[in-house]
Structure formats: structure tokens, C-alpha cells
Image: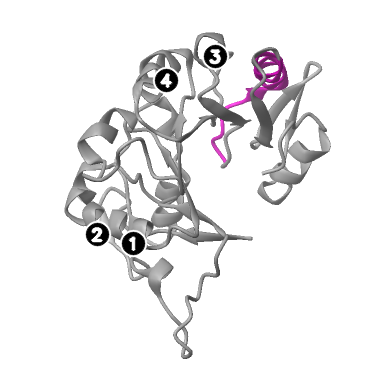
């Protein structure tokens, strides 16, 4: 089971992968400013209880954390201490945090972090080789128990070989969604999978994106089929 926990909303674009951000697209449809970062009504979701005093989110669930912002964005510094406290209280849940701001992790980690919380997965994104070469050495240097890499939206062929150490638990890859999506080449996906196989790292083709180039043909894939079509490729070596 899994739960989405968007404790703050809004973000600022910082790299090429942000160009067609889905948060900006969705907010624009509602005439909202996606660059304004604001705390949400869901902030305390993991510690909410029902009438019997039991946590509404049951033990053992995966909590996808801050998917409409970036957990480490500067504007959320004033709220993050309390967010870490909630994560610490719910040590029976696993929190997945995906970030483009891994370079802020040391500034943002809690005082009692030590070698890392056992119930937190930190996943650094890298959409291009340049971003991989900047972000992934930082990720590898940090005291984090569960480290993952996500190449999404994958915008070019990327060599992850120098970074696929035993510290990396898994690599996720996928294309870009939306009407203006840039093309993802299936050969780039297969190349990442080969790199992961050679290094003994788990791999998942997360989604095709809206435009997938395969065998010389570009396929337009509707949003509702992008995950299922990726699964049908049959190249995953991990489940989640």
C-alpha cells in the first residue's frame, strides 16, 4: 500500500528537467501560481488518528513525500524541523523523498540524523549527464541509509557507471509527460538497465512518457497508459 503526503506545495524550476513541470501545468489550469511555496492542510497527515485513537495511515505503508514540491526547497526551511519530527514519530512507515536539491541535504537534515533514519529513502533525480555528474557524487557522499537514483524525465543517454556503487539500492527511469513532452529514446532506457545489471543494482522502467522513440518510430502515449506500457516492456528487475 502507499500514501501521498504533500505537506507543502509549489516549487521553483532549477534545471532542464523542470521545464515542463506537471505541478506548474496543473496549477496553471486552476489559475494558481506554482512558484509560490505554501504549507498544505495535509501537513500532519501521517500522525492523524481516527475516533478510536489509531493512526489513519496504517503501519508498513509507503509514504510518497512532497511530490508537488521539493522537500529540500529553501522556502520550506521554516517547516522542515516539524516535518522531520513527524517522520521520526512514524518510524513504522517508509517515507520516499525525491529531490533535485540533494546539495541542500546537509543543511536540512535533522540534528539526530546520524547515519540516517531507517524509514527514509532519499532519491536524487538526474535528467542529463551534467545533472548526474553534479548531483550523484553528493548523494554518494551523504549519510543516508537508503539511496536511489531516478532518471526522469530522461532527456539524453546517461552513463551512471561511476555512481552505481553498493550504496545505491535502485535506479528508476522514465520519459516526460504532458503536451510539450520531449522524446525519450527507449535505447537510453535499455542502456541504463544494462548498466544496472552489470553493477547488480535494481532497475525499474517507471513510465514511458508521452513520446517514446522505439525502433525508429515515435509513439504518442496517453497519460493513463504510460505506466502500464512501461510495465509491459518486461525489463524491470524490482517490483516497486
Is 112 positioned to the left or the right of 96 in the image? left
Distance CA(mark 1)–CA(mark 4): 27 Å
**Of helix, strand and loop, which one carries label 2?**
helix
Is 89 positioned to the left or the right of 77 in the image? right
Local crowd size for mark 4, using a 10 Å CA cut-off: few (<14), some (14–19), many (≥20): many
**Of helix, strand and loop, which one carries label 4?**
helix
| x then y, percent, for residue 148 | 51, 32
Is 12 positioned to the left or the right of 75 in the image? right
3 or 2: tag closer to the N-terminus = 2
- Magenta-span inclusion, residue 186: yes
Mark 2–mark 1 CB contact (< 8 Å) = yes
Observer-nearest residue: 9 or 30? 9
Q: Which residues, given as a range, are shown in magenta?
A: 179-197
| x then y, percent, for residue 211 | 66, 31
Where the N terminus falls, by quadrant?
A: bottom right
Q: Quadrant of residue 91?
A: bottom left
| x then y, percent, for residue 167 | 50, 24
Distance CA(mark 1)–CA(mark 3): 34 Å
Task: Find disc 4 in the rendering and name its residue.
Answer: 136
1 or 4: tag closer to the N-terminus = 1
Mark 3–mark 4 CB contact (< 8 Å) = yes
- Magenta-span inclusion, residue 126: no
Amino acid at each position: 500500500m502507499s500514501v501521498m503526503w504533500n505537506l507543502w506545495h509549489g516549487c521553483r524550476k532549477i534545471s532542464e528537467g523542470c521545464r515542463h513541470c506537471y505541478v506548474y501545468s496543473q496549477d496553471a489550469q486552476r489559475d494558481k501560481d506554482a512558484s509560490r511555496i505554501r504549507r498544505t492542510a495535509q501537513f500532519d497527515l501521517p500522525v492523524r488518528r481516527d475516533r478510536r485513537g489509531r493512526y489513519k495511515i496504517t503501519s508498513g505503508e509507503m509514504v510518497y513525500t512532497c511530490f508537488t514540491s521539493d522537500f529540500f526547497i529553501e522556502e520550506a526551511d521554516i517547516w522542515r524541523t516539524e516535518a522531520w519530527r513527524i517522520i521520526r514519530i512514524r518510524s513504522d512507515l517508509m517515507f520516499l523523498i525525491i529531490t533535485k536539491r540533494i546539495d541542500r541535504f546537509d543543511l536540512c537534515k535533522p540534528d539526530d540524523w546520524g547515519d540516517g533514519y531507517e524509514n527514509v529513502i532519499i532519491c536524487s533525480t538526474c535528467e542529463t549527464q551534467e545533472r548526474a555528474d553534479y548531483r550523484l557524487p553528493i548523494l554518494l557522499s551523504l549519510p543516508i541509509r537508503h539511496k536511489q537514483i531516478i532518471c526522469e524525465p530522461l532527456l539524453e543517454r546517461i552513463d551512471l557507471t561511476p555512481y552505481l556503487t553498493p550504496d545505491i539500492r535502485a535506479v528508476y527511469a522514465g520519459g516526460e509527460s504532458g503536451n510539450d513532452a520531449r522524446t525519450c529514446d527507449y535505447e537510453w532506457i535499455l542502456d541504463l538497465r544494462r548498466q544496472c545489471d552489470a553493477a547488480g543494482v535494481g532497475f525499474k522502467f517507471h513510465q514511458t512518457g508521452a513520446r517514446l522513440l522505439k525502433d525508429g518510430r515515435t509513439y504518442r502515449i496517453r497519460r493513463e497508459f504510460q505506466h502500464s506500457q512501461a510495465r509491459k516492456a518486461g525489463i524491470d528487475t524490482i517490483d516497486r
